[in-house]
Amino acid sequence: MREAPGARNAKLFIAILAPESLLADAESSLSAAFGPIDLKSEVFPFSFTHYYEAEMGPGLYRRFVAAEALIAQNTLPEVKHRTNQIEGQFSPAGERTLRRRINIDPGYLTPAKIVLASTKDYAHRIYLDQGIFGDLHLRYEQGAYQPLPWTYPDYRTREALTFFAELRRRCLRSRGP
């Protein structure tokens, strides 16, 4: 993808929340949409909130994956709309209301920050385009990504921070000097 003037390309990552039995299928769909996956976090239980259980059921797991290719930062709204379509492919057919079986949230990583895509506005989110907001979620400081007051608990875990540290190394290698 073409780099926007003044903005370096970034590493696309995607947070998957699903029953453990659907993680591999979700990863395959994401790879088909965004190219080969070159990094995966450990799978860990999502026990931080019960928010998703009414819609998706209990026993959810989190995994972060990253696409091999860099993306232009300004393409995050298109990526979010595509991941919403993929979520819909996993919804049970014939139901009157949308019931997600998986939750897919994309974002991008630069050496300085991690930005998530969201359809929901909030005080710390900046409107990007196409109904999508950018949520600055972690910032790189003192040799590691640091959480902000609004950073989700699963992005503060050892699994997430280990994943993002390695993804940053790969991002720096991909960008070159």
Image (cartoon, helix red, strand yellow):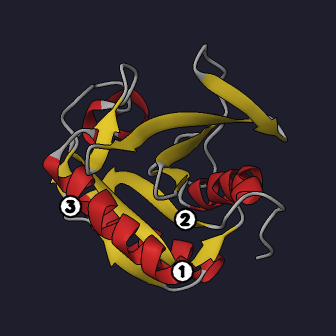
Circle 3 or circle 2, nearest the eye: 2
Q: Residues within 10 Å of mark 3 (few under 14, many from 20)?
A: some
Left or right: residue 147 versus residue 133 is left
Image x and y of residue 148, in percent: 37, 26
User: Disc number at residue 145?
Assistant: none
Q: CA distance from mark 2 to mark 1?
A: 20 Å
**Who's the residue at 40% across and 76% down the image?**
170
> Which quadrant does the N terminus fall into?
bottom right
Identify which residue, 21 or 81, lies in the foreground: 81
What type is the residue that disc 3 sits on?
Val
**Who's the residue at 58% across and 83% down the image?**
35
> Which quadrant does the C terminus fall into?
bottom right
Image x and y of residue 87, in percent: 57, 55
From the image, tell me which residue sits under label 3.
43
Label 2: which secondary element = strand
Q: Earlier in the sequence, mark 3 or mark 2?
A: 2
Q: Is residue 52 above or below residue 104?
A: above
From the image, tell me which residue sits under label 1.
177
What type is the residue that disc 1 sits on?
Pro
Q: Residues within 10 Å of mark 1 (few under 14, many from 20)?
A: few
Q: Earlier in the sequence, mark 3 or mark 1?
A: 3
What type is the residue that disc 2 sits on?
Leu
Circle 2 or circle 1, nearest the eye: 1
**Who's the residue at 35% across and 60% down the image?**
64
From the image, tell me which residue sits under label 2.
12
